[in-house]
Each structure stands twice: as C-alpha cells, then as structure tokens.
C-alpha cells in the first residue's frame, strides 16, 4: 500500500504539483483540428500554459481535421458535452456566428477582468473573424497567408535571376524552364484557397456580392467574369502547353512534396508549409517563398488570412471561462507568439507579436529565410471589401465543388467556361440552402 502511494505521489510531483495543488487547478477542454507535427505543436503550447502558472490547466485534444472538429463539436453540444474552447477554420466562421452557441471574445475577457487592446490584432487577421462592425468574436490562432514557392536553381538554369512577380512572367519563366529540361515547371492542385480565394483578394476582385457575404445571407457568387475567368482559362492553356502538372496526394506527391523534392520549380500554398519544405527538402535545394503573382496592370492588394480561430462555447461552468480567458491572454503574449511561430510555419496575429519577431532577429535566421514575405503580403494595404475575408455559408461544400469542377476541366471533360459556370451555379445553390437553414437570422 505504501509503495503504491509513494508511486502515485511521485507521479503527481512529476506532473507539476501535489494532489492538493492539482485539485486546486481549474481545468477546461480545448478541441482542435490539426494532426501530425502541428498537433504536437499545439500540445507543446498547452503544456507551456499549464507550466506557466498553478491556477488553471487545459486539456487539449485533436479531433482530426478541421471539418471533423466542427462536426464533433456539434454532436457534443447535442449531448451537452461540448468543450470549453474549439478551433474552427476560417470558412466555418459564418456557421459559428449564426449558431449562437458561443460567448463573444470581448464579453468573455471583460467578464473575467482582462483588459485587451483589441487594436493590437493585425487588421487583415482581425477582419476575417470580426462582425460587420469590426468586433472580433473569436481569437485568431493559427494564421497564415498564401505565397508562391520558387526554386532559384531551376530559375538560374533557365537564365532567370529573379522570381516572377506577374503571371505573364510566370508563364515566360515556365517556358524557359521547360526548354532547359525542367519537366514540371509549375505544380498545381485543386485547393481553392491559394489559386482562387487568394487570387481574388490580391486583385481586389469580388467572389460574391454583399461584400463577399459580410453584408447578409442573400449574397450571390459573381466570380465567373473578367480577370478571374481569364485567369483560369490561362491556367488550363498552360497545362495543355505542358507548363503545369497537377500534383495531389492522390497522384503520389502533393504540390508541396513535389516542390520540396525538386520535381517542380514553382507552386502555390500556405506560408505554413515553409517548415515542411525546410525539413523535407532535397539536399541542396535552393528555394524561397515570394508574393503571389498578379497580372500586369493590376494594383496589388493585401492577401487574405487563412487558418483558424478559437471560439469559447456556451454551457460550461463559469470557472472554466476564467481558465479559458487566462489561456487566451497567455496566447497573445509576445513570448507565446514567438514560440508558436518558431515551432510552426504560422505567423503572429498581433502587432506586438510581429514586433517581437522583428526585434529578436527571427527573420534573419537561416531556417526562417523568406518568411517575412507572408507578413509583407498580408499587411501590404488596408483590407478592402474584397480582401478582408469571406462570410459565405457552406464553404466546405463549395471548396469540394471547386475541386470537382477544376478536375473535370483539366481532365478535358468540360471547357473551363463550363466548369466555372457550373461552379457558380452550385455555389449559389449552397448559399440559398445556407440562407434557408438560418432563415430569419442576420449575420452580426
């Protein structure tokens, strides 16, 4: 009996406190939608919080991917077993806003005695998770933006000294690379975020009416016109010319793996992939992220934030909200933001966090080379109605429809014009279905 008690006491001490101390801690639960190395990073952040003080403790549990985290949370709510905090991806924001199952960020922090400088959150990031009046309802967490990844050596072999800044230059560079023996100048996939959503943002183009949905649930998709329509026809033309290869996980290597292996010289994706490329790059790969290209004659606007934010859910004991508020305050400290950016490829979400990275020489370290491009792109201009974000319902289903229509076009089953028209029609059906689901409600 004594031996068991001694072992138990030793275990509690190893975990950071005696039984009495552990019981005094107010705990809460945090569900998130990341796996692999990023899940390990979240667990590391949770451990840091638990070790930073003795009043509160957080139990952090991966639910798989973003969609599953949201689905599991909905199911848990029905059973009255919802977590205190849940990570919801960017395009799920409208769903959470209308579900009325959350405690607004400002109300939560004020009720727990925390004074927050809400203006400290970087405008392009805050805007995505804010109401039409600019009030943040959740806390930005893992944030990123899209960049183009460029293989310097492949460019130099083709006689190109500088990464292309325009799509016209991208096409020219791809032709020169192909002539120089590069089998795959450009790797492309069927993810709408970098090539569709971010393209519209930096060109200041509307994806939908009503300020991309911020103005109401009666928004309609209007992307099938002008430069957007031209761009996707260009992509298909370059594919037929042999300048683009489709690289997805289903085909063996996705765009990031294809770039890191040196198979493809250009691709597009999240700055969060910077760490993955650095860790998996072929020996001697000379590469860098650069801003997404724009078309000649276009005025570049800030790129859009991606990632997810943290929502506090209703229906939990009051003590858990005190603990959750302390957790949010902890995450917003410059120390925490620097740590998070260091162990992941994500960017800081506050001005003080960004200042800490600049002052500490973060961007000058070899392992972080080029990561400043994401902040330059994101903070290039004040967000416009077209670049601040999307407040459109059923976006998960829309992204799936995008992938299906693009696949049909690149497989030669449809013309690009037919695919875009079908996508817009399906998108509007999804918006009307979403509007019907929340009939009588208004976006905040």
Image (tube, rainbow, N blue to C red):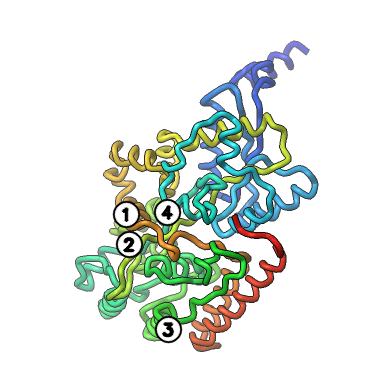
How far across and down, in percent of the image, does residue 415 sit? 50, 88
Q: Nearer the viewer, residue 320 or 388?
A: 388
Instruction: Name the residue that disc number 1 marks.
Output: 376
Q: Are marks 2 and 1 in contact (CB under 8 Å)?
A: yes
Q: Are marks 4 and 1 in contact (CB under 8 Å)?
A: no
Disc 3 from disc 2: Cα separation: 22 Å
Relative vertical location of residue 233 with respect to residue 290 in this rendering, above or below: below
Relative vertical location of residue 26 with respect to residue 128 in this rendering, above or below: above
Classify mark 3: helix, strand or loop: helix
State which tag comes first along the sequence, 3 or 2: 3
- Dot 1: few (<14), some (14–19), or many (≥20) neighbours within 10 Å? some
Disc 4 from disc 2: Cα separation: 16 Å
Instruction: Name the residue that disc number 4 marks.
Output: 124
Is any part of residue 81 visible from this angle? yes
- Residue at 29% across, 80% down: 175
Instruction: Name the residue that disc number 2 marks.
Output: 291
Instruction: Name the residue that disc number 3 marks.
Output: 233
- Dot 4: few (<14), some (14–19), or many (≥20) neighbours within 10 Å? many
Relative vertical location of residue 240 with respect to residue 281 in this rendering, above or below: below
For this view, does 280 lie left or right of residue 403? Answer: left
Residue 6 picture quarter: top right
Is any part of residue 174 visible from this angle? no
Disc 1 from disc 3: Cα separation: 29 Å
How far across and down, in percent of the image, does residue 164 sit? 27, 69
State which tag comes first along the sequence, 2 or 1: 2
């Amino acid at each position: 009996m004594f031996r068991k008690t001694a072992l138990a006491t030793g275990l509690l001490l190893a975990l950071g406190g005696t039984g009495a101390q552990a019981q005094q801690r107010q705990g809460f639960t945090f569900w998130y939608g990341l796996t692999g190395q990023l899940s390990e990073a979240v667990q590391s952040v949770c451990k840091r919080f638990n070790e930073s003080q003795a009043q509160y403790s957080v139990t952090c549990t991966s639910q798989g991917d973003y969609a599953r985290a949201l689905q599991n949370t909905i199911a848990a709510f029905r059973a009255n077993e919802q977590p205190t905090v849940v990570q919801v991806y960017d395009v799920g924001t409208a769903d959470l806003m209308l579900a009325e199952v959350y405690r607004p960020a400002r109300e939560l922090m004020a009720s727990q005695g925390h004074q927050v400088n809400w203006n400290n959150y970087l405008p392009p990031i805050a805007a995505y998770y804010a109401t039409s009046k600019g009030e943040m309802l959740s806390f930005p967490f893992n944030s990123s933006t899209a960049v183009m990844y460029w293989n310097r050596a492949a460019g130099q072999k083709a006689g190109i000294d500088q990464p292309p800044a325009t799509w016209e230059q991208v096409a020219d560079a791809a032709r020169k690379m192909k002539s120089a023996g590069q089998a795959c100048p450009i790797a492309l996939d069927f993810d709408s975020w970098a090539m569709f959503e971010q393209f519209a943002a930096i060109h200041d183009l509307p994806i939908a009416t009503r300020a991309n949905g911020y103005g109401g649930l009666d928004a309609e998709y209007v992307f099938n016109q002008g430069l957007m329509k031209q761009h996707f026809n260009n992509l298909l033309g370059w594919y037929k010319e042999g300048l683009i290869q489709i690289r997805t996980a289903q085909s063996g290597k996705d765009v990031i793996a294809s770039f890191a292996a040196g198979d493809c010289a250009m691709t597009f994706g999240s700055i969060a992939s910077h760490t993955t490329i650095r860790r998996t790059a072929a020996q001697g790969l000379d590469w860098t992220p650069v801003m997404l290209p724009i078309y000649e004659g276009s005025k570049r606007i800030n790129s859009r934030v991606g990632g997810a934010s943290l929502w506090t859910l209703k229906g939990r004991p009051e003590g858990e909200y005190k603990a959750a508020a302390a957790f949010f305050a902890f995450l917003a400290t410059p120390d925490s933001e620097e740590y998070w950016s260091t162990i992941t490829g994500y960017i800081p979400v506050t001005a003080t966090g960004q200042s800490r990275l600049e002052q500490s020489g973060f961007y000058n370290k070899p392992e972080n080379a080029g990561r400043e491009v994401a902040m330059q792109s994101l903070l290039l201009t004040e967000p416009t109605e077209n670049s601040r974000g999307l407040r459109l319902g059923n976006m998960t289903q829309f992204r799936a429809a995008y992938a299906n229509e693009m696949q049909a076009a690149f497989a030669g089953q449809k013309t690009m014009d037919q695919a875009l028209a079908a996508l817009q029609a399906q998108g509007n059906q999804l918006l009307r279905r979403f509007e019907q689901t929340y009939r009588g409600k208004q976006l905040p």
